[in-house]
Every structure is written in C-alpha cells, then in structure tokens.
Image (cartoon, grey):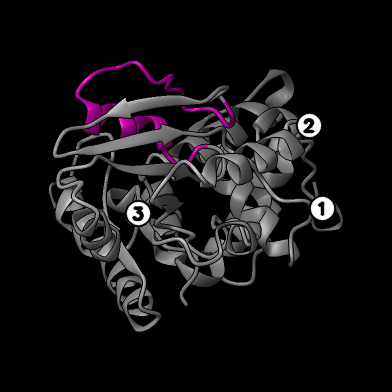
Amino acid sequence: MADFQKQTVQWFPGHMAKTRRIIRESLKLVDGVVELVDARIPYSSSNPELNKIIKDKPRIVLLNKCDVADPDATKIWLDYYKSKNRYALAVDCRTGRGLNHFTNTVKKALAPVIAKNEGKGMQGKALRLMVVGIPNTGKSSFINRMAGNAKAKVADKAGVTRQQQWFPVGSGIELLDTPGVLWPKFDAPEVGDKLAFTGAVKDEVTDLETLSCRLLETLSKTHPQAILDRYKLDSIDGLQGWEIFERIGKKRGFLIKGGEIDYERTAVMLCDEFRGGRLGKITLELP
C-alpha cells in the first residue's frame, strides 16, 4: 500500500480519434455547442482539444453535479467564465436544478445566429446545438431531462454514449448527442487523478486501492474535517493516504480472515461515498 504514490492512472480510450472526427464533422450542422463539465473539477473535466476544434462557435458551459460541489467554489467558477465572456450555468441534470435557465441562456448566446436567421426571413428556425463532454459528465442525463424522455442511454459509468442522436427539446432547440471522449495526454498528473476520483476514467483501468489512497491524500490536505466527520476518526495529522485508508477500513469493520483489512471493499466504499457526496460538497480545484 505504501507504494501508491509511484503509480499512475492508466486509461485506454480507443474510440477517441473517431469521436474527434464526429465532433469536427458535426460542427457544420450546428449553431453552437453545449459543453458539460463536472462542477467539482471544471478545469480537469474540460477537454482542451475542444478549443481547437470548436474555435469561434458559441459555447455554453454547464457545470453539472453542482449538488455535490462546494457552492462557493461554483460561484467562483461562474464568475470566472463570465470574465472570459463565456456563458455558464450551474446545474444538476439528474434533478433538473438550474436547467430552467437553459433556454434563455441559449437565446442570449446565439443572439447573432437568431438575428441572422431573421434577416434571411427564417424566423423561428430551430437552433441546433451539439452536446459535448468527457465521459461521465452527464450528457445523457442532460438530454433526457431537457427532452422529457429516456431515449439517450444513461449509466453511472464512463463512456456509454455510442452514436449520434438528435433530440428536439422544445422552444425551437434541437440537441445533437456525441460520445464522451478523453484527450491524448493529461497536461498534469493530478488531472488524471481528479478524473479518476470522479469516475471519468473507468474504474476497470485503474487500481482502485491506489486511487482511494490518493484521494485520501488529497482530501487530507484540502478537506481534512470531511474525513474526520464521515469516518469518525480522532485525527489524521501527519498520516499518509494509505495510513488513513487502513484506519477507515478498520473503523468500518471491513476485515477478512486473520483480522486483515478488506482493501477492495474499503476502496470501493471510499470512491462511492466521495462520488455520491457523502463526504460533503467538495470541489477539488479553483480557476
């Protein structure tokens, strides 16, 4: 367990090149782009390649899963996007929170497109938007909530969206779904960690025990009280991630024969509880 810091998160998105091609080819069909990011890691969950692909197309950023993110941090992010002249909303696509502002935001962001259509005598022409985002940011949940049905495939796993689909969502707006895709290389090791913490990288291609230790190492520096409160520990001062991991396993009684800690069960529990917001509303990065 003590060697967890030497390991790196591994992932193998074989469909990446195909998805990039789909996005490029689809751009000529749409008036703008909706990008979903994880409100807990808006920087790490935004694909930097999109800037090169999308270029000057109007873009709306949805900070999804705001229900498990720190609301003060989310406000800071919204102010940051505003300072960059980019439209952004804090939303929770599973409950629909914040999505009541989506239509008006689209009309503001695409005002030049609407004016151009009207100038050509095409009042009321449908506004077409492509929905993009890395795996597990909630694209399908967003589309289903807006479309009022369950046609888009949804799962709490990375990469279940497989093919292009158009969805009319009312108010003269149509959404184009795209597969979730990661980028060729992470620009910093901690980006890979954060993506794995939140489930954007498949658990199947990571070492969950290593990942849990790294998560605890990170939270012990940024949110130590969340660990103490959730797992009823007296202190974690000076402890490494794997030491906190073992104390939590013992505290929960996750033991196997001989009194050894059940590392797999402890790791699964820790990741599930963080992702489900049971450690509190936590954001891992700021602008």
Identify the disc placed on residue 62. Answer: 3
Spot occupied by residue 176 in the image (x, y as percentages of width and height): 42, 34
Between the residue at mark 2 and the residue at mark 3, the CA separation in whole angstroms equals: 26 Å
Looking at the image, which residue is at 14% across and 39% down? Answer: 171
Residue drawn 62% across the image and 57% down it:
53
Instruction: Tell me if mark 2 has few (under 14), some (14-19) or many (20+) residues whose alpha carbon lies within 10 angstroms of its own.
Output: few
The numbered dot on residue 14 is 2
Please, is residue 158 above or below residue 270 in the view? above
- The dot on residue 2 is 1
What type is the residue that disc 2 sits on?
A: Gly
Residue type at mark 3 is Leu
Q: Amino acid at mark 1?
A: Ala
Q: Please tell me which residue lies in front, 180 or 248.
A: 180
Q: Residue at x 52, y 46 (%)?
A: 28
Mark closest to the chain's N terminus, 3 or 1? 1
Q: Secondary structure at mark 3?
A: strand
